[in-house]
Structure formats: C-alpha cells, structure tokens
Image (tube, grey):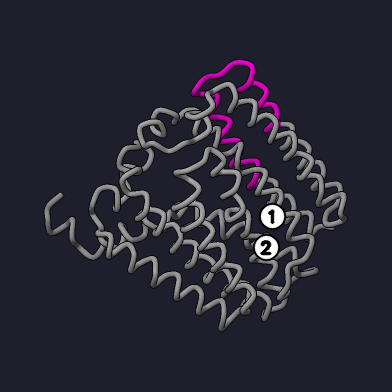
C-alpha cells in the first residue's frame, strides 16, 4: 500500500468506520429494534415507522461513539491481542485526538437526534448506556475485576429498553424482561471467547475470569449461567408477551446452549469453546427473531 493510498479519503473512512465496531453495533440496533416492535401492538403506523427509524439512527450513532471511545482507551491492550491488533487506534493509524473527536461528534449527533426526533427519555437512557460502557465498564471495571463482564453487561443489555422507551416514552416490565435475558446471556457468551483467547488476555493484563480463576472454574460458571438464562428466556411466555411458538424456540435454543456448556465443562477444547461462542450468537439472534415472529403471527 502506498502512502497516498494509506491517507486517501476512502482509507480514512474505513478506519473511522472500523472504530465503531460495525458487527457489534448491528446487534445492538437489532436488539433495540426488537424492543421497538414489541412495544407496538400489531402493524406499526407510518408515524411509528419513522419514529423507529430515527431511534435506530440515534442509537447507532451513540453506540458507535461508545465503541470508538473503547478503542481509544484500550489501544495498548488491543495491540497485544491478535483479535484486536488490527484496529486503527491499536495500529496507530488514527491519533488519540482523532478518535476522541470522532467519538464526541457521534455521541453529540446521536443524542441530538434522539432528543429532538424521538424523546428525551430515550436520549438520557442511551447516554447513560454510553457512560456505563465507555467509562464505567471500559475505564473502571474491565481492568480491575474478573466480574467486569457481569457488571458491565448491564450496558450491553440496554438496547431493548432503549427501543421500548423510544416507542412508548416509558420503560415497561416487558422491556426489563428483555434486559434480563441479554444481561444473563452476556457472561457465558464472553467467557466462552475468553477461554480460547486466554493467552491474549493474559498478555494484555486484563483480569478475565479464565486468567484469574482458571479454565475449569470458568467452564462451571458458563454452565450455571446458561441454566439461569434458560429460566429468563421462558419469562416472555410466562408474562404473556408471547405464545407457544416463542416458547418452543426458547426451549430448543436454551437446551442447545446448555448442551454446549455441559460438553465444554466435561471435556474442554479450544474448538468446542469457539463453537459455544458462535452458538451463543445464534442463540440470542434466533431467540429475538422468534419473539418477533411470534408477535406478528399471534
């Protein structure tokens, strides 16, 4: 790559875009969208569709800002890990000032969109989520405690609540059930990743659970969390948010996740940990897709 190419507008755009962690943000917006859809009985009106669109844009901007700030704060750690060493901040392709300015602009734009075109409650909840992830989790919890994922998972579990608030102007018990599902899903999801990336985390100095408490203890925690998670996944049906269609999907997906956790606990391998991590992504996406399908069919 020539110097001219490295500093071309296209290359710069890709670097800034990479800071937003697109795949992570897409999942965040998808979960927020689920909250929006479930908050509206039946088929949404044109006005509700427009409101939801603006909410998705605002949430995407603020989530991207939080991701960019995370990349800035963790640039040294990222440079030591194969999974993250490619990030523009870790490689020095973007300066601290550029990353901070980019994060600030995205956060300001997203907050303005949410405040002016959605509602103030959604803006404040989204901004609180930004602070929770970018400051409380990234700066304070992640480098200090192996329970960082558990406590910090509250920020990652907020998207359905944001979506619900965007459409209704309040936070209902249904939104809190969706929050609980993601909150309990987060630890086994990330710990499965941490198991086969343990040497990366050890080199980085982060006190992830496999580093501080060992492989076997982490596998036990994954198993216990998947069992508790299954109970939470049944709550939409118990509360009356869904019908038997969602219940069937929730049971099958949860048993699948527990099955992976049991296999992982009985006999560990990096490949099985990878499969568990990948299935956790399928689990959450398919669970919410089933909830969405159930909402419109029944």
Percent of width and height locating residue 43: 76, 70
Asked which secondary structure carries label 1, the reply is helix
Residue in front for this viewpoint, 248 or 146: 146
Residue in front for this viewpoint, 166 or 44: 166
Q: Residues within 10 Å of mark 2 (few under 14, many from 20)?
A: many
Residue in front for this viewpoint, 134 or 98: 134
Report which residue position mark 1 lands on: 179
The residue segment tinted magenta is 256-285
Q: Viewed as shown, does residue 284 lie left or right of 131? A: right
Report which residue position mark 2 lands on: 161
Which SS type dominates the magenta stretch? helix
Q: Viewed as shown, does residue 122 lie left or right of 236? A: left
Image quadrant holding the C terminus, namely: bottom right
Percent of width and height locating residue 93: 23, 54
Q: Is residue 269 above or below residue 80?
A: above
Q: Quadrant of residue 251?
A: top right
């Amino acid at each position: 790559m020539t110097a001219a190419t490295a500093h071309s507008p296209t290359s710069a755009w890709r670097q800034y875009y990479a800071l937003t962690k697109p795949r992570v943000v897409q999942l965040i917006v998808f979960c927020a969208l689920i909250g929006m859809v479930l908050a509206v009985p039946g088929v949404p009106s044109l006005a509700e569709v427009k409101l939801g669109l603006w909410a998705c844009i605002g949430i995407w901007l603020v989530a991207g800002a939080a991701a960019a700030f995370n990349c800035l704060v963790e640039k040294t750690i990222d440079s030591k890990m194969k999974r993250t060493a490619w990030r523009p901040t870790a490689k020095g392709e973007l300066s601290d000032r550029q990353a901070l300015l980019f994060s600030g602009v995205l956060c300001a734009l997203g907050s303005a969109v949410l405040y002016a075109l959605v509602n103030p409650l959604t803006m404040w909840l989204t901004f609180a989520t930004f602070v929770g992830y970018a400051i409380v989790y990234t700066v304070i919890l992640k480098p200090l405690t192996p329970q960082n994922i558990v406590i910090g998972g509250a920020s990652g579990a907020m998207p359905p609540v944001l979506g619900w608030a965007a459409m209704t102007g309040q936070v209902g018990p249904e939104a809190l059930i969706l929050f609980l599902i993601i909150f309990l899903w987060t630890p086994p999801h990330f710990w499965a990743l941490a198991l086969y990336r343990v040497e990366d985390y050890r080199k980085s100095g982060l006190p992830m659970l496999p580093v501080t408490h060992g492989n076997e203890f982490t596998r036990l925690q994954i198993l216990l969390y998947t069992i508790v998670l299954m109970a939470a996944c049944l709550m939409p049906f118990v509360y009356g948010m869904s019908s038997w269609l969602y219940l069937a999907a929730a049971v099958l997906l949860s048993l699948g996740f527990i099955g992976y956790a049991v296999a992982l606990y009985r006999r560990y391998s990096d490949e099985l940990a990878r499969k568990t991590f990948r299935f956790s992504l399928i689990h959450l996406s398919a669970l919410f897709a089933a909830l969405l399908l159930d909402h419109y069919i029944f």
